[in-house]
Amino acid sequence: MLNTVALTALALTAFAANSILCRLALGQHNIDPASFTLIRLASGAVVLWLIVSIRHGRAAVTHGTWYAAGLLFVYAVAFSFAYLTLSAGTGALILFAGVQMTMMSAGLQAGEHMQTRGWLGTVLAIGGLCYLLWPGVSAPSPVGAALMATAGIAWGLYSLQGRRSTDATATTMGNFVRATPFAMLSSLLTIAHLHVEAAGVALALLSGMVTSGIGYVIWYAVLPALGATRGATVQLVVPVLTALGGVVLLSEALTVRLVLASTMIVVGIGMVLWHQVRTNIVEHK
């Protein structure tokens, strides 16, 4: 169980880092969103191909599916384009609301159950997220909101695919390789808006090779242990981590609201996971 907690924490940290990297690149107009998406997916595919090659002596694309790759691309491209018109807080709220609803709906349909403590924890975590992001944010652009909602649903569905993976690294590599041609097409369709600077390329490479490629491998590895409902709930901590990263890396203010909301979300997630922790302890005695 400790390994699951540690790996989950690493994956969520990678997700938060992705948001910060994307905001840095697009917010400072260092790169256009289609190019950011292409470099992110292509570099992720390359580093994962190298990892699989080292592990197995070859890296044939036998894992992953076109369906999962399509979901990965839709998430990545919608995420990038949405942040052209959405504020960071509004975008995160819409994204993770979409993820939460998609994954929890699938989990409940599949027969997963939570005790009352788990439901109370979910409500507390969602309440903390809303408290952190909703008051004071600007009304979202309808187009941007639709794009980010699409990204959230696509990421939720992509995460659900990870529960069936028997080799997280090879599966993620296969999905990244298959998603790259879609990103190439989107870049060709938006070539009139091409804008690439060295800083933007560097941020996209870091996002693709480390926080996306390796981060998603870790996420696929821990999802079977978490299940859909818990996997959805723990991702609510990502906006908190992103906000804290903004304080450290972007010199944003550390507010009372951030501290209180972070506490609500962390406690809520703890309540959701507590039943699983107790169950695993009993099973290993």
Image (cartoon, grey):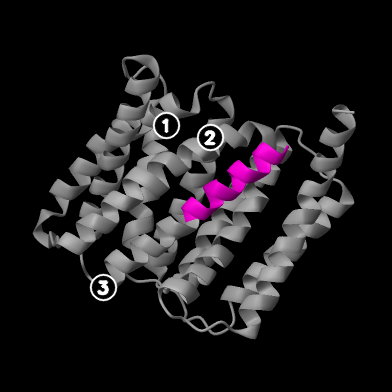
Horizontal and vertical percent for residue 234?
Answer: 65, 52
Q: Is residue 5 magenta?
A: yes
Foreground pick, 143 / 172: 172
Horizontal and vertical percent for residue 249?
Answer: 42, 72
Image quadrant holding the C terminus, namely top right
In the image: residue 54, left or right of residue 182: right
Foreground pick, 122 / 199: 199
> At numbered mark 2, what does the secondary structure look like: helix, strand or loop?
helix
Residue for badge 3: 28
Q: Which residues are magenta?
A: 1-15
Q: Are the two marked residues, 2 and 1, in contact with CB atoms closer than 8 angstroms?
A: yes
The CA distance from mark 2 to mark 1 is: 8 Å
Which residue type carries mark 3? Gln
Horizontal and vertical percent for residue 256?
Answer: 65, 84
Residue for badge 1: 172
Q: Are the two marked residues, 3 and 1, in contact with CB atoms closer than 8 angstroms?
A: no
Q: Say which label, 2 or 1, has the lower sequence index.
A: 1
Residue drawn at the location 69% of the way across and 64% of the way down: 265
Query: Considering only vertical position in the picture, is 257 above or below 107?
Result: below
Residue drawn at the location 58% of the way across and 66% of the way down: 240
Q: Say which label, 3 or 1, has the lower sequence index.
A: 3
The CA distance from mark 3 to mark 1 is: 30 Å
Few, some or many residues within 10 Å of mark 3 (<14, 14–19, 20+):
few
In the image: residue 240, left or right of residue 278: left
Residue drawn at the location 36% of the way across and 28% of the way down: 51
